[in-house]
Image (cartoon, grey):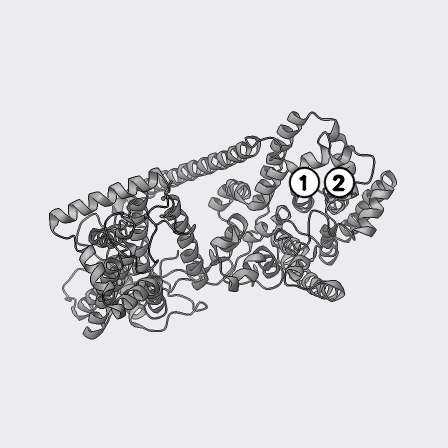
């Protein structure tokens, strides 16, 4: 080893081999990402062209189809079907001669090519410096995200032109040479989408005044050319419809994610709404432009373009879903000093751009104003409020690294099986955790509902057959106490009320409360507990899918009284479908008992007092009494719930090793032992070995201090030099 380290040539050969292997892995990852992007593109093409005629490319057919708006001799705006500018109609006019089938295929593949070009330009425009890994993987990742985004999916499905203005602006800012060419691209984009004129002051205040003037001249020339060719249409658009306001459907429609649409949805109307819209729009435009100019001068031109585009979305009279692509570009902004905080903003933007708003927030009346305007709120936040880091910030390149517990031996040699999953000591980002919990629960609810299958016919028969199997097994094991327990509860009104209330009220509240306390007081153990309950829930979903099971209350002839939902009419074929939001046959395993057992075990392991441990174990006891006494679960369902929770804890240990508190405590004991040991003067010590040993001891001591301290490290604190960066 010493020869390899000091002789020079062998070390170089070893380094070259390592670099070559890393480069090969990077190229393989890049190829895999491009294949993923190609699969997503193929999926989009199949979704569009595989739809029945009349349900695909509806906007395109409305414009240029055999009976489209562009064929008629009257005004384009006699109806609200055409939403583009007169210049857009002039550009699209030649397409009316194309055959319908050829136009559909050509438009779809042409739009895909525009999306790929957009992704390539965005990847090329990332603010420097970027690592080699980022530069190689950025393009396929950008194209994949664009393919998944709601604006691109809507553009492909509707046959819209909204990608063209975004691509023209990016091409003008990052591809073409010469300020006049820049202005030409941005001016044509503004002629297609007037709010793109907001980029004119951005060019002016960043010193590109020739480009700004060229933008204005190009926009005016295109608009005047359309006015000369279609004077009546131009007057209708620019005067009667106030630059497109009111076209494309009611302005208060949920798809209109602009300030104007939000104010209308809040109940405002008339001159007061218009005045407030103009005031708020002016404020967003001024704040957004100031921030965009600052980021452009800082060398983050792509972020400046995204901020300006988000401001343009907010101030537009109508900003339909296919016009919100500017927000996705804002993922390039860096937010947060800690390395663990860097993913929050990009993940939030991607979720807003790819998932329905109801998956991120509960579909309750109190959240409806946020759900209805989620994309608008994200765009306004990006334009005016999100604290993107400047390149001059010391945290732009070197974020505060994540702190990890020192590794200690596990009970088995090959644990953990994923060494990269080290135990993090610092508290995770709260917003990221809330998003994770909400998205995970929404996916859980959707999968749980999908696992119901056809609950009115074959699904019901299958679930009841499985219920009879469970009953027969319990009779064999002498565990069939459901009928006795249920009727004992029904004969005792106060007990029936208590267990029904317990069944309905504590299922979600207690686990969330424990996670909240751990997050605030024991962040190290929070990650361990969260991983265990997450894995247990995933395993339970597999059980719901593979083994739909009718609970005792839905078994005909068993005589069980449903104390929670009320009596069931077994003569109705769809009695099992009590609600559209839940799967009544997701009984095995019982997550009611599983989650309560998780609560009891976490309290048992972490609580500092014996009475706290005993109190924690009461929750799974009351829960098992509630699920059996109310007729909602079999006894063996509770056994299944215990099994998936045990498997969740076991998989967490297998993948990550001992929990961080145990690891840090063991490391602290080892550090104390090493400190007490006195080295002998006669010992022939190796200086390099001593250096490594001292560094490890310091790291372990710091890990113990972090676990035992109730105050987490602040985001702005600089970490010790011996921490491992994330």
Say which residue appears at 79% left-offset and 37% top-offset: 90
**Image quadrant of residue 465?**
top left
Horizontal and vertical percent for residue 249? 69, 48
**Image quadrant of residue 64?**
top right
**Residue marked by disc 2:** 88
Horizontal and vertical percent for residue 193? 72, 47
The disc at residue 708 is: none
Q: What count of labels does the image hold? A: 2
At mark 1, the secondary structure is loop
| Nearer-the-camera pick, 623 or 259 | 623
Quarter of the picture containing the N terminus is: top left
**Residue marked by disc 1:** 161
At mark 2, the secondary structure is helix
Give the spatial CA distance, label 1 vs label 2: 9 Å
Horizontal and vertical percent for residue 15? 36, 42
Location of residue 477 with respect to 721 vertically, above or below: above
Give left or right: position of 230 versus 401.
Answer: right
């Amino acid at each position: 080893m010493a020869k390899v380290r000091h002789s020079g040539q062998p070390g170089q050969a070893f380094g070259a081999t390592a670099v070559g292997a890393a480069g090969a892995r990077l190229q393989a990852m890049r190829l895999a990402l491009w294949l993923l992007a190609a699969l997503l593109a193929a999926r989009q093409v199949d979704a569009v062209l595989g739809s029945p005629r009349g349900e695909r490319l509806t906007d395109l057919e409305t414009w240029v189809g055999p009976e489209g708006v562009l064929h008629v001799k009257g005004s384009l705006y006699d109806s609200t079907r055409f939403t583009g500018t007169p210049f857009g109609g002039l550009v699209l006019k030649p397409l009316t001669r194309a055959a319908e089938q050829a136009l559909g295929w050509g438009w779809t593949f042409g739009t895909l090519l525009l999306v790929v070009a957009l992704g390539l330009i965005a990847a090329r425009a990332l603010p420097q410096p970027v690592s080699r890994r980022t530069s190689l993987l950025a393009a396929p990742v950008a194209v994949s995200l664009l393919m998944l985004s709601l604006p691109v999916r809507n553009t492909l499905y509707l046959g819209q032109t909204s990608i063209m203005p975004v691509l023209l602006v990016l091409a003008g800012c990052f591809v073409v040479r010469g300020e006049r060419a820049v202005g030409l691209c941005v001016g044509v984009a503004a002629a297609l989408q007037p709010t793109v004129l907001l980029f004119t002051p951005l060019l002016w205040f960043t010193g590109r005044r020739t480009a700004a003037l060229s933008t204005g001249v190009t926009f005016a020339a295109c608009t005047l050319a359309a006015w000369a060719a279609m004077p009546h249409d131009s007057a209708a658009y620019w005067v009667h419809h106030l630059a497109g306001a009111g076209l494309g459907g009611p302005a208060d429609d949920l798809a209109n994610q602009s300030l104007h649409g939000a104010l209308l949805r809040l109940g405002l109307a008339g001159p007061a709404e218009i005045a407030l819209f103009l005031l708020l729009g002016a404020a967003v435009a001024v704040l957004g432009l100031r921030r965009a100019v600052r980021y452009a001068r800082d060398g983050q031109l792509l972020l400046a373009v995204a901020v300006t585009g988000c401001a343009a979305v907010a101030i537009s009279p109508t900003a339909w879903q296919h016009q919100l692509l500017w927000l996705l570009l804002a993922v390039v902004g860096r937010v947060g000093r800690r390395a663990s905080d860097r993913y929050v903003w990009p993940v939030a933007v991607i979720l807003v751009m790819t998932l329905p708003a109801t998956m991120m927030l509960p579909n309750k009346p109190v959240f409806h104003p946020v759900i209805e305007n989620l994309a608008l709120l994200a765009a306004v936040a990006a334009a005016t409020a999100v604290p993107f880091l400047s390149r001059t910030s010391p945290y732009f390149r070197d974020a505060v690294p994540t702190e990890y517990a020192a590794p200690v031996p596990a009970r088995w040699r090959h644990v953990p099986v994923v060494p990269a999953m080290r135990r993090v000591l610092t508290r995770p980002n709260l917003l990221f955790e809330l998003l994770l919990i909400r998205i995970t629960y929404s996916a859980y609810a959707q999968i749980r509902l999908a696992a119901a299958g056809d609950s009115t016919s074959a699904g019901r028969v299958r679930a009841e057959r499985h219920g009879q199997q469970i009953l027969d097994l319990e009779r064999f094991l002498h565990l069939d106490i459901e009928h006795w327990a249920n009727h004992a509860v029904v004969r005792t009104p106060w007990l029936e009320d208590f267990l029904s209330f317990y069944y309905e009220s504590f299922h979600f509240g207690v686990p969330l409360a424990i996670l909240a306390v751990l997050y605030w007081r024991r962040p190290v153990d929070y990650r361990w507990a969260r991983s265990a309950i997450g894995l247990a829930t995933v395993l339970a979903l597999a059980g719901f899918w593979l083994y739909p099971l009718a609970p005792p209350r839905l078994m005909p002839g068993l005589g069980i009284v449903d104390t929670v939902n009320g009596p069931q009419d077994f003569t109705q074929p769809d009695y099992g479908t009590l609600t559209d939001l839940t799967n009544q046959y997701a009984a095995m395993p019982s997550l009611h008992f599983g989650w309560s057992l998780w609560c009891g075990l976490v309290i048992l392991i972490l609580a500092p007092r014996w009475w706290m441990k005993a109190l924690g174990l009461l929750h799974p006891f009351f829960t098992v009494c509630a699920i059996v006494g109310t007729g909602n679960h079999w006894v063996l369902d509770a056994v299944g719930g215990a099994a998936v929770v045990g498997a969740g804890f076991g998989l967490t240990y297998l993948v990550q090793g001992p929990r961080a508190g145990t690891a840090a405590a063991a490391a602290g004991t080892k550090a104390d032992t090493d400190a007490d040991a006195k080295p002998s003067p006669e010992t022939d010590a190796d200086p390099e070995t001593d250096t490594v040993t001292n560094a490890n001891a310091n790291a372990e001591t710091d890990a113990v201090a972090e676990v035992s301290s109730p105050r987490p490290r602040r985001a702005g604190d600089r970490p010790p030099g011996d921490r491992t960066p994330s």
